[in-house]
Image (cartoon, grey):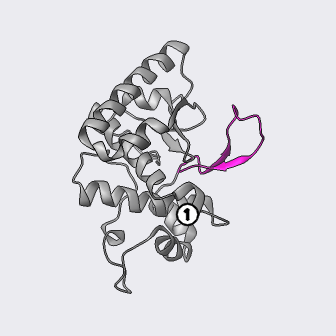
């Protein structure tokens, strides 16, 4: 999930906000996320097995939320700022990344452009397909929802191929600010993981 980089959003999530949370904020955010996860299960029961399989992990190095396909990582301050409907959207967003195996499909692709491409797929489904209430700063473009010019459905790979033609332009257009590929400071293996 990408974060806003320009003006303050109506959600109260200002750019460059202090992402470090206190122990109390982490506990409060974790409880809110667990509650939001339960609401997602009642709203979309099909995703229940995956929702409960993902390990909930406070990750202050992530600006918003992210997944590596195994964990649901969240910035506590981001979670505390979100209204419950936007929290449900954010959780579903990360779940769809897992359903579509986005973290494991990146390969050698540019991580920022891959994140934009996968966010366009996921957000298109949630906004245009499901008509869910969402934050006004998400990566979204109706062009990439539905059929591609070749008549087949858009895929993350097709969107990536389209965006990479002007990677810098895409990064500016979507004001990307993501975890993409960062070292999780709590992971002792030293591996750089793909997160979306």
The location of residue 142, given as percent across then percent down, is: 30, 67
Based on the picture, tell me whether residue 195 belongs to the magenta stretch: yes
From the viewer's perspective, tell me whether residue 44 is left or right of residue 144. left
In the current view of this chain or complex, which residue is farthest to the bottom?
A: 150
Tell me the SS state at disc 1.
helix
Query: In terms of secondary structure, what is the magenta stretch mainly?
Result: loop
- Res 92 → quadrant: top left
In the current view of this chain or complex, which residue is farthest to the front?
A: 49
Tell me the magenta residue range: 177-196
* Residue 144 higher or lower than 31, as above or below: below
Count of all numbered marks drawn on residues in the image: 1
**Is residue 10 in sight in this rendering?**
no
* Residue 95 higher or lower than 187, as above or below: below
The location of residue 39, given as percent across then percent down, is: 28, 33
* Residue 181 higher or lower than 109, as above or below: above
* Residue 142 higher or lower than 101, as above or below: below
Identify which residue is drawn at 46% across, 48% down.
1
From the viewer's perspective, tell me whether residue 59 is left or right of residue 129. right
Based on the picture, tell me whether residue 76 belongs to the magenta stretch: no
Crowding around mark 1 (Cα neighbors within 10 Å: few <14, some 14 to 19, many 20+) is many
The location of residue 120, given as percent across then percent down, is: 41, 61
The location of residue 100, given as percent across then percent down, is: 46, 59
- Res 130 → quadrant: bottom left
> For this rendering, which residue is in front, 29 or 19?
29
Identify which residue is drawn at 48% across, 55% down.
175
> For this rendering, which residue is in front, 59 or 164?
59
Q: Which residue is mark 1?
A: 113
In the current view of this chain or complex, which residue is farthest to the top?
A: 24
Identify which residue is drawn at 52% across, 70% down.
160
**Is residue 107 in sight in this rendering?**
yes
Identify which residue is drawn at 44% across, 57% down.
119
From the viewer's perspective, tell me whether residue 151 is left or right of residue 193. left
């Amino acid at each position: 999930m990408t974060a806003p980089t320009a003006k303050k959003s109506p959600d109260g999530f200002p750019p460059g906000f202090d992402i470090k949370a206190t122990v109390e904020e982490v506990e409060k955010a974790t409880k809110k996320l667990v509650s939001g996860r339960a609401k997602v299960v009642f709203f979309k029961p099909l995703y229940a097995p995956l929702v409960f399989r993902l390990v909930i992990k406070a990750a202050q190095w992530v600006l918003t939320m992210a997944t590596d396909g195994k964990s649901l990582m969240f910035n506590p301050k981001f979670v505390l700022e979100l209204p419950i409907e936007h929290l449900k959207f954010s959780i579903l967003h990360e779940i769809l990344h897992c359903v579509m195996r986005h973290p494991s499909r990146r390969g050698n692709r540019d991580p920022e452009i891959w994140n934009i491409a996968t966010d366009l797929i996921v957000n298109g489904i949630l906004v245009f397909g499901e008509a869910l209430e969402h934050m006004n700063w998400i990566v979204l473009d109706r062009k990439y929802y539905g059929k591609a010019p070749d008549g087949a459905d858009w895929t993350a790979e097709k969107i990536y191929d389209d965006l990479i033609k002007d990677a810098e332009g895409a990064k500016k257009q979507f004001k990307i600010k993501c975890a993409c590929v960062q070292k999780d400071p709590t992971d002792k293996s030293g591996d750089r993981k793909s997160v979306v």
